[in-house]
Amino acid sequence: MNRKTPKKSLPKQRIGILFGGRSGEHEVSLLSAASILKAIDKKKYDVVPIGITKQGRWVTAHDAQALLTGKFPAENPRLAGDPEATPTAAVLKRGDEAIIIPPVPAESLQPFGLGAPHLAVSSPDVGSSGSSSLDLDVIFPVLHGTFGEDGTIQGLFELADIAYVGSGVLGSAAAMDKDAMKKLFSAAGLQQTPYLAMLRSEWRADPRKATRLIEKSLKYPLFVKPANLGSSVGISKVHDRSELAPAMDLAASYDRKLVIEQGVGGPGAKPRELEVAVLGNDSPEASVVGEIVPGAEFYDYEAKYLSDTSVPIIPAKLTAAESKQIRQMAIAAFKACDCAGLARVDFLMEPASAAAKGKKKGSKTKPRIYLNEINTLPGFTSISMYPKLWDATGVPYKQLIDRLIQLAIERHKEKQQTTFTRT
């Protein structure tokens, strides 16, 4: 009697989902992580939730669960989240606090051990020795904004020699700094709205001089932004001089560098807000184009997360030529910033009224399309624009998570071909 030999199942890859953080987008990160933890294939991956509190403390197990549900250290019940997300994320049975550099012999200066292929996360109170190592194959950082999207945490992953989802140090830092990002876009020949960058110290030293410079260079309405922040935190639309100083002061409270952009379309005109999701490493692909019709004057933090009045339209109502142009520009922006894994690229399209201004009656006009910015770790709940755009393109949420993990492994393997020493 012939008996089939049972197939040996491959060991599961251990994926660390890192969320929270010290940025102004902490709550948004919790929503994204909750959705990923619910949707990720548990049959394929062992999942380790790792939270970072607003104070910078790294936590796992029940503390990570409390952080994820908004109960550690405080709740934010107003924030609209993914209705499908479960209230729990605990997959570890033990461990209270995570530290990223485990104890090493006193004579060693190697923080992660010689040849260590994994990032070690230690948990106290596990075993008789007082600590236990939780080896991770891939880190999926769901840290939006400062200290998570700006290259800082990516530098730690590089030192640990671990695969991680998303852009590297350069791509993350360049895309996070709107001034540096715009310079790279300009070098790539991508059309943008006129802008000006200014240091917080310059504004505070002489507000009148700064105001004159802004008004000489740009026309109202203006958008004033912190250079290094996302989710529209600290952003103001400025209609005239009376609104400029409060907007500058608000942005200056979030960053040392400010970006002032000229609005698209002129006074009283609202541009169309378009978005494209990009996926890949060296050969990225672009999703269909989506449009956001904001419930407010522009797509600010309130409109994104605290109300349900903004309307997504996927795919956006565009001509084939417009859609092709925007998707090509999205991939060009992705490459210009040396991004990897994922990114959402945002555009502004000139309203039809502004495009027709000064043209002969009856003549055909093409609204100008402006590249606005790129976001290397966009919101990632199942109802966020990035996953929704890919879902409309034929890549469902669960499959998207899997693709991103495999892209992280692919990029890490490619890096292993690089020689860092002379011998």
Image (cartoon, helix red, strand yellow):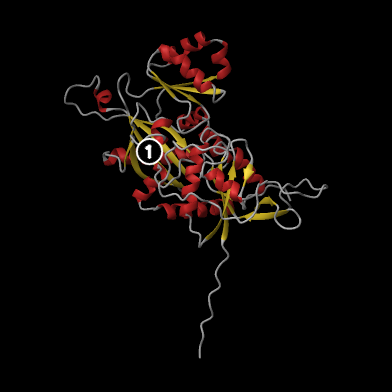
How far from the left and from the top, in percent, is residue 423?
A: 74, 51
- The vertical placement of 51 against 10, above or below, is above
| Left or right: where 19 falls relative to 131 | left
Q: Kindly state the secondary structure of the residue where label 1 is placed.
A: strand
Amino acid under disc 1? Glu
Residue 126 found in image quarter: bottom right
> Where residue 346 appears, x then y in whole percent?
40, 35
Q: How many marks?
A: 1
Could you tell me which residue is drawn at 38 percent across and 31 percent down?
Answer: 299
Q: Which residue is drawn at 55% across and 19% down?
A: 199
Query: Which residue of the protein is positioned furthest toward the left in this rendering?
Result: 362
Q: Residue 1 in the image: state x and y as whole percent.
A: 50, 91
Q: Is residue 318 placed above or below 259 in the rendered structure? A: below
Q: In this view, does 97 lie above or below 151?
A: below
**Would residue 128 appear left or right of 264 to someone viewing this image?**
right
Give the vertical position of 352 relative to 78 (above or below). Answer: above
Q: Residue reaching furthest top?
A: 208
For the point 58% across and 17% down, the residue is 201
Residue 216 at x, y = what percent? 43, 12
